[in-house]
Image (cartoon, rainbow, N blue to C red):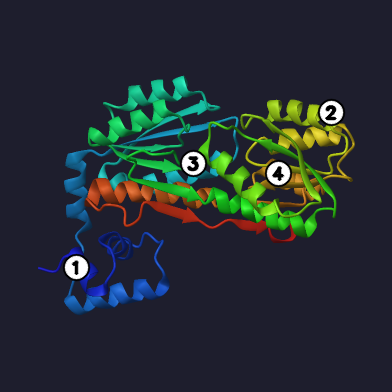
Amino acid sequence: MVTIKKIADLCGVSRGTVDRVINDRGNVKPETKELVLNMARQLGYKPNPAGKALSARKKHPVVGVLISSEGNPFFDEVIRGIKLAAEKYEIYGLEVIWRNMRGYDVSSQYKIMEELKDKVNALIINPVNDAVIAREIDKFVDSGIFVVTINNDIDKTKRHCYVGSDYVNGGETAGALLKMIAPPKSDIGIIMGSSKILGHKQRLAGFEYKIRDNKNFKIVDIKENNDDDICSYDVTKKMLETYPQINVLFIVAAGVYGACRAVLSLGRQKDLTILAFDTVPTTVEMMKQHVIKAVIYQHPYRQGQRAMQVVFEYLVNGIEPDKTKHIMKNEIKILENL
């Protein structure tokens, strides 16, 4: 009998890769796809999706999705990616339980995790980087629940894999880009999301590392906005009023629109170089108004799609992730290539 495992062994790829090719789920290089399809044809392999769907329905796989999406438009595309992938898998009886929250309150996230624990076979979570959440993730894994962290990772847990961007590289990319577009002498104000989020700290560290050797680059102030536009407006306006010498604004995570509205309220849009992340509609509008010079894009839709795909492959096909980190490339965007 020809199996997916046999095709994988002969092609020198993972079972997950073969499954994605056979079922046309994407995320496979064209040359690898051709290799797998040719091998399947040579061996006379014939998939049985109806049988697999019937078997999966008996298991009734349930996925919990817990994301800090309230008030953060970045996650709209992440959620869209998860939803569209989940719709493809409905034939297999896949059910999704959605939970969202605002900001990064540890106790709120913990309570939702406790509520989900006895209801799900897998969890996709955008975690707060805290020991309480780390211990809870380990409890999930120890009880047999498959855990994928999305968009942000967490320190030292047993989570099965992470899907998202390389935050250190994102910060380094921002620093390198700033050297190209910022004034020769730059006094930099930084608006970051939250020190409770590992990725935000990593992005800031990457940025600081990249500009460390430039004596004309000085970080004047760093403030947190909790990825909230209203908070972002307030802290940005106060920062610019307190330090009028700031001529560069680096927005590390969300709250971009609020920060830009503060800049506009002070009439500073022409003398500030602003660098941010991602292409949510309000950020694109600020780019069109020439308030933001450039952004770094981290493929939110693909993050959501890939996270659900990894979960499906494990729950339905019993395929472990072929790597512990699925990294989306950081991509520089300017108005002309949006």
Along the viewing direction, whichever of 4 and 14 lies nearer the viewer:
14
**Amino acid under disc 4:** Thr
**Amino acid under disc 2:** Thr
The residue carrying mark 3 is 152
Q: What is the C-alpha distance between the residues marked 2 and 1? A: 68 Å
Query: Which comes sooner in the sequence, label 1 or label 3?
Result: 1
Q: What is the C-alpha distance between the residues marked 3 and 2? A: 32 Å
Q: Is residue 161 in sight in this rendering?
A: yes
Horizontal and vertical percent for residue 109? 44, 25
Query: Which comes sooner in the sequence, label 4 or label 1?
Result: 1
The residue carrying mark 4 is 283
The residue carrying mark 2 is 242
Spot the residue most to the left.
1
Q: What is the C-alpha distance between the residues marked 3 and 4? A: 21 Å
Horizontal and vertical percent for residue 175? 69, 53
In the rendered image, the vertical position of residue 332 relative to residue 146, given as above or below: below
Q: What is the C-alpha distance between the residues marked 4 and 2? A: 25 Å
Q: What is the C-alpha distance between the residues marked 1 and 3? A: 39 Å
Callout 3: SS: loop
Question: Tag on residue 46?
Answer: 1
Image point (75%, 57%), residue name: 179
**Residue 225, quarter of picture:** top right
Query: Which comes sooner in the sequence, label 4 or label 2?
Result: 2
